[in-house]
Structures are given as structure tokens and as C-alpha cells.
Image: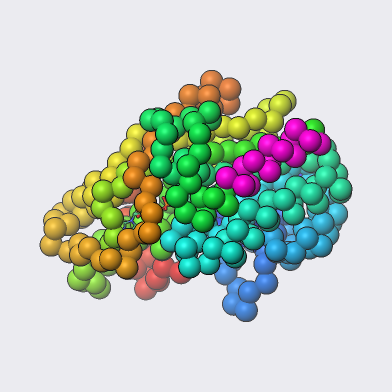
């Protein structure tokens, strides 16, 4: 019998890569999708025939319980979230409801439907915020700097609490930023690669950005979903940092992207206060050695390869008449 997995957030960047990965591993893959007036299956349409999509919402306890009863999974990957940091300041309560309390709803549904289900929580390096230690590891204290970061700290601790209270196989992956051609257009990497491609093709003349000084540990989403799966194959649940161990500033990102297409970023980038944040996370760089030792996981795509991959995909998209969704 094929293993069954339920992915919340299957229509998102990570959900789409994880679904592909699990299908390749021979899983029967179920995905929770919320009702929207316009269908947004663009990231999974190439595999939609192989997936079982179940209606449900992280805000609705009953729908989560019904989804678990319907698909009877051995593994649940909780990737659903309001995941854009900037939006968390304008929608802080909504962000807390989905990104924090949603985790409790799902864990409690698991506890009642089948406590043997293995659970993965998508925790985030945003929890480290104003960092207390460099590089950040599993034991580094949290100091979140946004309503999103605060919500993720709650999700992280409720996962540990359900592990300790009810003996659930509940694991938290503390993933540093990971990107891909499927990244949402509002995130800085994709915003840069998409607009560099547009500028090169004569379809745009400037790129408006916020803080160029912040530093991130950027990896490739395709590598990171493999780590999620590896975590749930371990005998014991635990917490793992997943990172490349390298950090780059937004300015470096911009410079690498423009120079790949033989452009000088100084000619096109305009700083715009609208994209500055009320509180910034200045520096993230992870120590993924525990994942290396226990899971045998290492990243395979470098920073420069990642940015070039994203630009190539955006050039192709734009040349074929498409646009970012
Ligand atoms: P994403 O592209 O924004 O995807 C988020 C997913 O959550 C989408 O499928 C979205 O559905 C779904 N969702 C949102 N609200 C929901 C609700 N109320 N009920 C059901 N589904 C809902 O995010 P991602 O980059 O793939 O990230 C996946 C997870 O990892 C998130 O939890 C994120 O916070 C976390 N994370 C991401 C990173 C990163 O660098 N990418 C790093 C650390 C942690 P719609 O398509 O309907 O909007
Ligand atoms: O790409 P970002 O929006 O990602 P951020 O805030 O680091 O969050 C992402 O990674 C987290 C993991 O650490 C995830 F948990 C979270 O869900 C999300 O996937 O911004 C990166 C940096 C920030 O310092 C921001 O201030 O880029 C800076 N930035 C500068 N100009 C910009 C812009 N960010 C965006 N989105 N847009 C700009 O114009």
C-alpha cells in the first residue's frame, strides 16, 4: 500500500515542490485547498491529475478534522500560512489566526482522529528576528520582529507542546529563506528576478525596493522540501534548522541579478519607503549541521545558481507572453 500524505498549503511554492517530491517517492498525495472565487492552481496544474484535493481552511476546525478522516494520512505537512512578513503588520490578527492558531487546530484534529500521524510544522528563521547568536541554530533564543514571526514562534512551541503532552510524532523544521521560479512575486528574490528580466526585455525601466542592507540565508525550495520529508522519516520527532550557512545582502542579490544580464543595477534600482518595514530582521544565517549529521541533508543549489535559475525562468515566461501570478 502506498503511503498517504496530506499537505496544507499545497498551492504555495513549497507545497507544489513537496507534492512533486512525494509523488516521486510513490506516495498518494492529498492537498488541502481553501475556497477562492478564482482558482489559483497554477503551481500544481502540471500534476493536478495525480493529486487528491480536499476543501478546507486553517481557520475552520471541522474542515481539518473531515480532511484527516477522508484521507487517513500517515504524514501531515503543515505548510499553510499567511507567509508574507510585510502583510503581517497590516493584517496582524488574521496572520495570528492562520499562522499560529491554525497549527493548534490541525494538531488537535490529529490528536482526535489518529495520534499516530507524523506531523511537520513549517517553522521559520523569522523567529530568530533580532538575532541573539550568529549563526542561528536550534538552541538560539527567539526574538521575532513581526506579527508573522511572533505567530511562527507560537506555531513552533505548540508543536513541541503537543509532542510532549500527547507523545505525537510532531517535528518542527526551522527553515531559512528558500526561493525558486515559483516564489510569489511579492518576495524580494522573485521581485528582483522578474523585474530584471522585464528591464532586459524593455518591458520596465526601474525597480523599486526597500532596505538593501538586510542579509538573508537564501537556498532553493526544491532542496528544502527534501529536508521536510527526511525529518518525518526519523524514528523520533525533533527540531531542525535547514539553511545553507551563507548570507547575502539584498544589495548583493540585486548586483548578481543585474550583472547576469549585463546591466548595472545603479541605473535601475530606486529605493522606496513603501517597502521599508516597521521593524527589520537585519541578519539571518543558519547553522544546519544538525540536519547534516542526523538527516544527511545538504543544499545542492548555490546562491548564484538560484538567482540565475529564477532569471532564466522569468525570461522564458515573459518571452512566451506570460506574466507572474
Ligand atoms: P506560500 O507560497 O505563501 O504558500 C502558502 C500556502 O498557504 C498557500 O497554499 C495558501 O493558499 C495556503 N494558505 C494560506 N492561508 C490558508 C488558510 N487559511 N487555509 C488553508 N490554506 C491557506 O508559502 P511558502 O513559501 O510555500 O511557505 C510554506 C510554509 O513555510 C509557510 O508556512 C511559510 O510561512 C513557511 N516558511 C517559508 C519559508 C520560505 O522562505 N519560503 C521559510 C520558512 C518558513 P492560497 O494559494 O489559497 O493562498
Ligand atoms: O523576501 P522577503 O519578503 O522575505 P522575508 O521577510 O525574509 O520572509 C521570508 O522568509 C522567511 C524565512 O526567514 C519566511 F518565514 C517568510 O514566510 C518569507 O518566506 O524579504 C527579504 C528582505 C527583507 O529584509 C526586506 O526588508 O528583503 C528586504 N526587502 C527590500 N526591498 C524587500 C524589498 N522585501 C520585499 N518583499 N520587497 C521589497 O521591495
**Vertical placement of residue 290 versus 98, above or below:** above
Find residue 87 and report its horizontal and vertical position in percent.
Answer: 47, 64
In the picture, residue 38 is in which quadrant? bottom right
Give the camera-side residue of 103 and 232: 103
Whether residue 137 appears in this view of the structure is yes
Residue drawn 50% across and 61% down?
Answer: 88
In the picture, residue 248 is in which quadrant? top left
Give the camera-side residue of 37 and 215: 215
Residue drawn 57% across and 48% down?
Answer: 152
- Magenta segment: does it hold 158? yes
Find residue 29 and report its horizontal and vertical position in percent.
Answer: 71, 51
In the picture, residue 200 is in which quadrant? bottom left
Q: Main secondary structure of the magenta part?
A: helix
Left or right: residue 89 versus residue 33 is: left
Where does ligand 1 appear, by image quarter?
A: bottom right
Residue drawn 21% across and 68% down?
Answer: 206
Looking at the rendering, the stretch of residues picked out in magenta corresponds to 153-166
Residue drawn 25% across and 66% down?
Answer: 272
Left or right: residue 267 versus residue 152 is: left
Give the camera-side residue of 192 and 160: 160
- Magenta segment: does it hold 197? no
**Vertical placement of residue 218 versus 269, above or below:** above
Give the camera-side residue of 168 and 34: 168
Left or right: residue 120 versus residue 71 is: left
Amino acid at each position: 500500500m502506498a503511503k498517504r500524505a496530506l499537505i496544507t498549503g499545497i498551492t504555495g511554492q513549497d507545497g507544489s515542490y513537496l507534492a512533486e517530491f512525494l509523488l516521486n517517492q510513490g506516495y498518494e498525495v492529498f492537498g488541502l485547498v481553501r475556497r477562492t472565487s478564482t482558482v489559483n492552481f497554477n503551481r500544481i496544474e502540471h500534476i493536478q491529475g495525480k493529486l487528491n484535493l480536499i476543501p478546507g481552511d486553517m481557520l475552520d476546525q471541522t474542515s481539518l478534522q473531515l480532511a484527516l478522516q477522508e484521507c487517513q494520512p500517515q504524514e501531515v505537512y503543515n505548510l499553510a500560512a499567511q507567509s508574507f512578513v510585510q502583510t503581517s503588520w497590516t493584517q496582524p490578527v488574521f496572520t495570528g489566526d492562520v499562522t499560529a492558531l491554525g497549527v493548534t487546530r490541525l494538531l488537535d484534529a490529529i490528536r482526535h482522529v489518529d495520534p499516530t500521524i507524523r506531523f511537520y510544522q513549517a517553522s521559520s528563521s523569522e523567529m530568530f528576528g533580532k538575532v541573539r547568536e550568529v549563526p542561528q541554530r536550534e538552541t538560539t533564543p527567539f526574538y521575532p520582529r513581526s506579527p508573522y514571526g511572533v505567530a511562527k514562534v507560537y506555531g513552533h512551541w505548540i508543536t513541541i507542546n503537543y509532542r510532549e503532552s500527547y507523545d505525537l510524532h510532531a517535528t518542527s523544521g526551522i527553515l531559512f529563506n528558500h526561493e525558486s521560479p515559483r516564489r510569489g512575486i511579492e518576495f524580494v528574490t522573485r521581485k528582483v528576478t522578474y523585474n530584471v528580466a522585464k528591464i532586459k526585455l524593455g518591458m520596465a525601466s526601474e525597480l523599486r525596493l526597500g532596505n538593501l542592507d538586510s542579509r538573508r540565508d537564501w537556498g532553493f525550495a526544491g532542496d528544502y522540501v527534501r529536508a521536510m520529508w527526511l525529518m518525518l522519516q526519523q524514528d523520533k520527532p525533533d527540531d531542525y534548522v535547514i539553511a545553507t550557512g551563507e548570507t547575502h545582502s539584498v544589495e548583493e542579490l540585486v548586483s548578481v541579478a543585474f550583472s547576469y544580464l549585463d546591466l548595472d543595477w545603479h541605473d535601475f534600482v530606486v529605493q522606496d519607503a513603501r517597502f521599508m518595514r516597521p521593524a527589520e530582521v537585519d541578519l539571518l544565517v543558519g547553522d544546519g549541521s544538525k540536519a547534516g549529521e542526523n538527516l544527511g541533508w545538504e543544499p545542492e543549489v548555490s546562491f548564484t545558481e538560484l538567482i540565475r535559475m529564477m532569471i532564466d525562468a522569468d525570461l522564458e515566461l515573459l518571452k512566451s507572453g506570460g506574466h507572474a501570478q
